[in-house]
Image: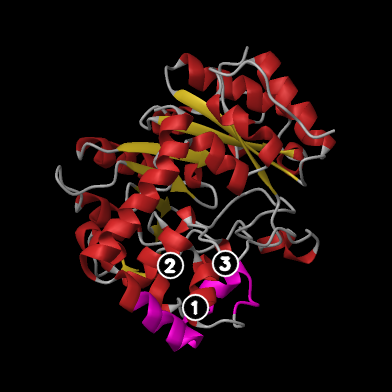
Amino acid sequence: MELTEFMGLRPVPCAGLLLTLTRRCPLGCAHCSTSSTARGEEPDAEQLLRFVRSFTADDRPEVVMLTGGEPLLLPDLAYELATLVRAAGSRSVLLSGMFFARGGRVPPPVMRAVTAVDHFSASLDAFHEREIPRRDVFRAVRQVLEAGIAVSFHLVGTGPRDPYLADVTTAIRREFADRVPMLVNEVRPVGRAAAWAAAGTRRPAADRALPCAMAAWPVVAFDGAVLACCNQQAVDRRPVPGHLSLGHIAEDDWATVRRRSLSSPVLRMVRAVGPAHLYHRHAPGADEFGYCAGCRSLPAHPDVVAGAVRDASGLVGELLDREAARTQADAGPVELLRRYGCPPYADLVALPTITTVTRSP
């Protein structure tokens, strides 16, 4: 499964599932959005397996992303989950911080897990490189490629003008002859970066619709709660804001989670027009919270919630949700990354088909 296939499904409600295996990680990266440590919490493994076993040929996500923390701290669980995902007719993606790559080799238990998935993504950035040398990451990634698994890099920098991003993207293109795509993102002020990273200054105009693709895929969090949003501040918040809560893997199966996501009028409107536009329509002057923060604050604004329910209940809401997803999917993964990633590097998601990339000076 290529990166463009995976990212092309990202705006489609319930086309994917983000599955957290653990919050543990042996690395201590200063930018870690999840504040992962060697002793972080994790969902119950049997509950995770039971939840994935609830997929059926007729009701399943198209793709499941195994993430963390560091999912390859649990290689046997990652292997078993990937095997179950494939048996149901879905495909799997695994994102790793490459802790195992010191010396450039992939240990057998890790390789067994990696070769069970359909796509492997390696995180690489200035913070990871302080603990795992780039040359070791490249050698390990080459082994995965040689095993026949599609590979990408997940890169993070401080912004479009970060010299590290210019350097590392050039190095990857040279090392892998433009055969390996890259998803390039920017450090956000969440997790361990909350104390030092600058908040983005981009603020959407509330008078126009700006759909939220990040509310499309359910997320299984570190404690087994299932949320409708992958924003880390939403994932970490307890209690979960009511409109973002889809259940818990201890009690609910995939069909239940999917039904709740697709049938919620509030989520339909968040996905179709975005939270800022909801405030603009139903509570003018109350949209000072911003885009994501405003979404998390929706339960405190019953008039806005009531307006969303009026607007998006029934077949009209279903059609609006579906059309917003289709429009975003038709725009393609490059456009998606121009909005959610580091814009000057968005084209790199489409490697190996592109020949040039435009960067900020």
Q: Are marks 1 and 2 in contact (CB under 8 Å)?
A: yes
- The residue tagged with tag 3: helix, strand or loop? loop
Residue linked to disc 2: 223
Q: Which of marks 2 and 1 precedes in the sequence?
A: 2
- Quarter-wise, where is residue 206 in the image? bottom right
**Residue at image coords 22%, 69%:** 314
Measured along the vertical axis of the image, is residue 264 above or below residue 284?
above
* Residue found 57% across the figure and 67% down from its top: 207
The circle drawn on residue 207 is 3
Q: Amino acid at mark 2?
A: Asp
Q: Would residue 44 be found to the left or right of residue 347 on screen?
A: left
Crowd class of label 1 (few under 14; some 14 to 19; many from 20; radius 10 Å): few
Residue pointed to by mark 1: 238
x, y percent for residue 69: 54, 52
Mark 1 vs mark 2, foreground winner is 1
Amino acid tagged 3: Asp
Q: Nearer the viewer, residue 182 or 336?
A: 336
Q: Which range is magenta? A: 287-309
Q: Are marks 3 and 1 in contact (CB under 8 Å)?
A: no
